[in-house]
Amino acid sequence: MNITTKINDSNNIIHLADGAIDFPLKQKVQTFFSKAKEAEDASIYPFRPMMRRSYSLSQLDPTQKTEKEECEARSGAFWECVGRKPSKFGGYIYLFKIREEYNDFTLGPGLSTRANDVKKKRAEIFPALEVSANDGIVTYDITYDIEEQIKSRTKYAFDVEFEVKKDLISACPDSEIQAIKDDLQTNIENAIRAGITFNAKLRIPFRKNAKTLQEIGYQFSEKNGQVFKEAPDREALLGAYHNLKEIHPERTWPDFQITSSEGIADDESYALAHFTGGLLSTGFEFNHDLDSHIVPRLHRLFEGTDYYQKTERELIHHVFSVYKKIYIAKEQNPGLRKYSEKLNFLLGMTADTLFSLSPADQLENKLTDDFVRYQIENVCEELNWESYVQRRFPTDTPRNAEMTRLWNEVENRQYSLYLVKI
């Protein structure tokens, strides 16, 4: 459904609340509706091309941070920012190195421990996930060679396994030892080949845009046992994107915008930022915002204007529908206002989940009311979200039954409004 229909209902919602809604809240919801409308218009009528600049306005600010401070601010859970370089389109390309304890790609002692530590850290930082070293290389390093990886990882695994079993093997007759070694190597190679090939197939839809993302300034590489990542800031990314549009007009990419943020946004602001092009932090969540939301958006943009406009309308519709239902429910039943933070969390969770999807995630099949309702009703049972909910609400942790009850109340109020209108 086109969201314009829902936006036109804003006056009806405010009228329904009558005198129970104060002016600042009226203004807030009107602003939200107008921003949603602007977002839809933007997906249909592209923004004017940004002005080409050779410098960032922030560089003229006498209170600007030093390069060291800017880099330290952007260091994340997995990635340490070790420097930056100016982009020819304005802004900077930031250089990151994987923290050694989370290097789950480079072969060497402790690899399995590091891989397990990555899994533990993911659960700890969820939902602010960052791409790991292994996922970054396999997905976006254009020099990644499957056969070379199978060969080197087979040798590494064989050496480790042989060291563990060498006493048993050496106790066998000399005439059988080579055959045992050959069987061991074949079994290891088959297992590694199956794993790497399967993972590579999953990554193919993402890898097809690796070269274009590299041209925008987003890339991964390995050198001397260390994994590096380059990532553009807001100005560098938008400048490079518009430059590619000018060079390749046949690609019919739509324009888009990115909102810059110094910190972690509240749930409503977070959802709203996605309506106008996405949010890119200048702090600790820089890597998460780029990896989990801006890059998936770029994947959608690379599919062309028609695809992007269609999916963007649907994404906005589903997130905005959650906001609208919560707003109506709280105005019809003021008792729900004491649960505002939990209800707004559901809004933020919905935006975070939906706007992290790309064409490779079979996006079109997930843009349904049933998918959104499933995400909301099962948020407290999904392992990573359950852990986050406990951290978010440490003294009054909601269980799945409570969230389901709250959402049922929200949807019942929406249904009541429908009955009033007809």
Image (cartoon, rainbow, N blue to C red):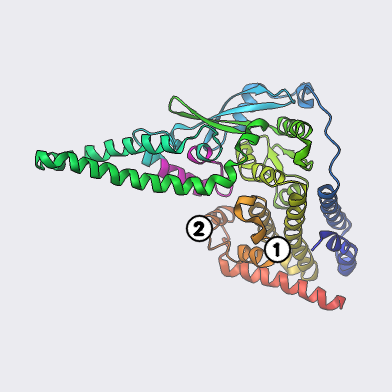
* Magenta-drawn stretch, dominant element (helix, strand or loop): helix
Q: Kindly tell me whether residue 120 is visible in this rendering.
A: no
Residue 124 is inside the magenta segment? yes
Q: Residue at x 71, y 33 (%)?
A: 237
Residue at mark 2: 383
The image's mark for residue 177 is none
SS class, disc 1: helix
- Residue at (34%, 34%) from the top-left corner? 109
Q: Is residue 12 left or right of residue 65?
A: right
Tell me the SS state at disc 2: helix
Other residues around mark 2 within 10 Å, as few (<14) / some (14–19) / many (≥20) = few
Q: Position of residue 350 (x, y in %)?
A: 66, 57
Magenta region: 115-136
**Residue 418 left/right relative to 236:** right
Measuring from the top left, give residue 101's x and y in whole percent. 43, 35
Q: Residue at x 23, y 39 (%)?
A: 162
Q: Which residue is mark 1?
A: 338
Expressed as whole percent of the image width and height from the top left, the position of residue 193 reads 39, 45
Q: Is residue 62 above or below residue 372?
A: above
> Residue 175 is drawn in which quadrant?
top left
* Three-letter code for the amino acid on which mark 1 is drawn: Lys
Examine the structure image and report whether residue 29 is included in the region drawn in magenta. Answer: no
**Would you say residue 413 is visible in this rendering?**
yes
Q: Amino acid at mark 2?
A: Leu
The numbered mark, 2 or 1, whose residue comes first in the sequence reads: 1
Residue 295 in the image: above or below residue 93: below
Q: Quadrant of residue 354?
A: bottom right
